[in-house]
């Protein structure tokens, strides 16, 4: 008996589709409708008073719901609009004019993060992009060797988006600390499906978004800063939420707060901060440990089914190295994915990875078997051909 299936009825989209894409956008919890109504009610009936009745604090108070999932303490997480922006806020705390100006990245990082850091070369940053040897794993030895006493930042994913490989973050963080570098751990593909604890990892920064495994919808990303670092850093991306006396409207230099508001800037994204809460609350109640147990079982089932058909699997076979997604490179994977979506089986495709299948705690085993059988049928009947792009 799969205990976690009792949560299925909380997600409307599961009634009308085979939803295998939580690595991209987690299903919306039904109670988001009510939460968005509370937002509209507050605006409609409380108007401007809503700011002092909670809105002003939401970018940190709602952060506590993320903190509880990633192992941070209350008040230690601030919320922003997306992960790229959290990287920018962190980067803006540093100077690139001294000898310590190197940024070490792996080519399997999410491209938006690579684009952002590459642009910092205009400020003097030196960016070293390390190549994965197999397209699946982060090249640990190369990373450890590249982190030296000129390294400033190491932005690295805890789970790689393309292959779902779990990275040995602890080893990278230890190495970075030996030489005085800082690690920005991107937990987007881990939080809500792979248990971890930012305090145990001793990471300098942890960032991620809530729209995938946390079922929190678009528009909210978290930023955890190790508490002992907080007041040593001052983002150049600053604004009135970071100021000690925002309502004095002083035309002067920023007097930065000492808590997590220090990393905020302008008016927060209030609607998204309402929408994200049901998902965060539910993940906390379901328990990431329980989600992980089920995820290992279901991803193992997908791999077994794919290998039986002779399809290439671009995710680690060993479950201890694997997050919640399995990338399957069957023949004509891109066109097969388009046909799956046309049949209401929601998955995605990434070049170099294949079809990404990501069951979450609300998926049934028979949905996995059905999706794999449909891939087989699409290949056998050549139904994928109708998605061929003209040359
Ligand atoms: C690991 C990882 N980092 C970052 C992002 C996206 O960053 P942003 O929130 O800036 O769009 C994604 C996917 O959307 C991702 O998988």
Image: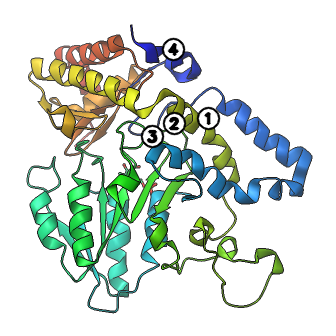
Q: Reading the chain from its start, which is encountered first: label 3 or label 1?
A: 3
Q: Residue 55: which disc?
A: none
When asked about the image quadrant of residue 90, the answer is bottom left
Q: Would you say the beta carbon of the disc 3 residue lies within 8 angstroms of ligand 1?
A: yes
Question: Do we see residue 121 in this rendering?
Answer: yes
Q: Reading the chain from its start, which is encountered first: label 1 or label 4?
A: 4
Q: CA gap, disc 2 to disc 1? A: 8 Å
In terms of secondary structure, where does tag 2 sit? loop
Task: Give the residue at mark 4.
Answer: 6
The local crowd at label 3, few if under 14, some if 14 to 19, many if 20 or more residues have their Cα within 10 Å, is many
Task: Give the residue at mark 3.
Answer: 212
Along the horizontal axis of the image, is 84 left or right of 246? left
User: Answer yes or no: do the residues labelled 2 and 4 have beta carbons within 8 Å?
Assistant: no
Relative image position of residue 56 (x, y in whole percent):
74, 60
Q: Residue 278: which disc?
A: 1
Q: Reading the chain from its start, which is encountered first: label 3 or label 4?
A: 4
Tell which tag, 3 or 4, sits nearer the viewer: 4
Q: CA gap, disc 3 to disc 4? A: 20 Å
The local crowd at label 2, few if under 14, some if 14 to 19, many if 20 or more residues have their Cα within 10 Å, is many
Here the colouring is: rainbow
Q: Reading the chain from its start, which is encountered first: label 2 or label 4?
A: 4
In terms of secondary structure, where does tag 3 sit? loop
Q: CA gap, disc 3 to disc 1? A: 13 Å
Q: Is residue 262 above or below residue 20?
A: below
């Amino acid at each position: 008996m799969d205990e976690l299936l009792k949560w299925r009825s909380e997600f409307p989209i599961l009634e009308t589709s085979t939803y295998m894409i939580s690595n991209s956008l987690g299903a919306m919890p039904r109670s988001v409708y009510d939460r968005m109504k509370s937002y509209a009610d507050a605006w409609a009936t409380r108007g401007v008073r809503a700011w002092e009745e909670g809105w002003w604090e939401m970018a940190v108070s709602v952060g506590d719901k993320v903190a509880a999932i990633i192992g941070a303490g209350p008040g230690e997480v601030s919320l922003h609009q997306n992960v790229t922006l959290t990287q920018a806020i962190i980067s803006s705390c540093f100077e690139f004019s001294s000898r310590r100006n190197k940024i070490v990245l792996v080519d399997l990082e999410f491209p938006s993060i690579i684009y952002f850091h590459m642009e910092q070369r205009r400020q003097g940053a030196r960016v070293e992009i390390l190549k994965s040897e197999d397209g699946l794993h982060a090249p640990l030895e190369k990373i450890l060797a590249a982190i030296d006493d000129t390294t400033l930042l190491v932005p690295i994913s805890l789970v790689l988006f393309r292959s779902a490989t779990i990275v040995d973050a602890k080893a990278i963080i230890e190495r970075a600390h030996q030489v005085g570098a800082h690690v920005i751990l991107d937990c987007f593909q881990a939080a809500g499906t792979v248990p971890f604890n930012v305090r145990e990892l001793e990471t300098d920064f942890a960032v991620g978004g809530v729209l995938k495994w946390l079922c929190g919808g678009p528009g909210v990303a978290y930023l955890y800063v190790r508490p002992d670092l907080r007041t040593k850093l001052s983002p150049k991306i600053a604004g009135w939420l970071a100021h000690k006396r925002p309502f004095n409207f002083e035309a002067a230099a920023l007097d930065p707060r000492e808590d997590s508001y220090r990393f905020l800037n302008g008016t927060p994204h209030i609607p998204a901060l309402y929408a994200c809460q049901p998902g965060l609350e539910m993940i906390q109640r379901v328990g990431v440990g329980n989600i992980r147990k089920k995820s290992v079982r279901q991803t193992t089932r997908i791999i077994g089914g794919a290998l039986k058909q002779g399809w290439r699997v671009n995710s680690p076979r060993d479950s201890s190295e694997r997050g919640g997604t399995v990338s399957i490179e069957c023949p004509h994977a891109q066109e097969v994915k388009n046909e799956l979506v046309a049949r209401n089986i929601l998955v995605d495709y990434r070049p170099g990875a294949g079809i990404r299948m990501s069951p979450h705690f609300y998926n049934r085993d028979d949905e996995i078997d059905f999706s794999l059988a449909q891939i087989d049928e699409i290949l056998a009947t050549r139904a994928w051909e109708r998605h061929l792009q003209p040359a």
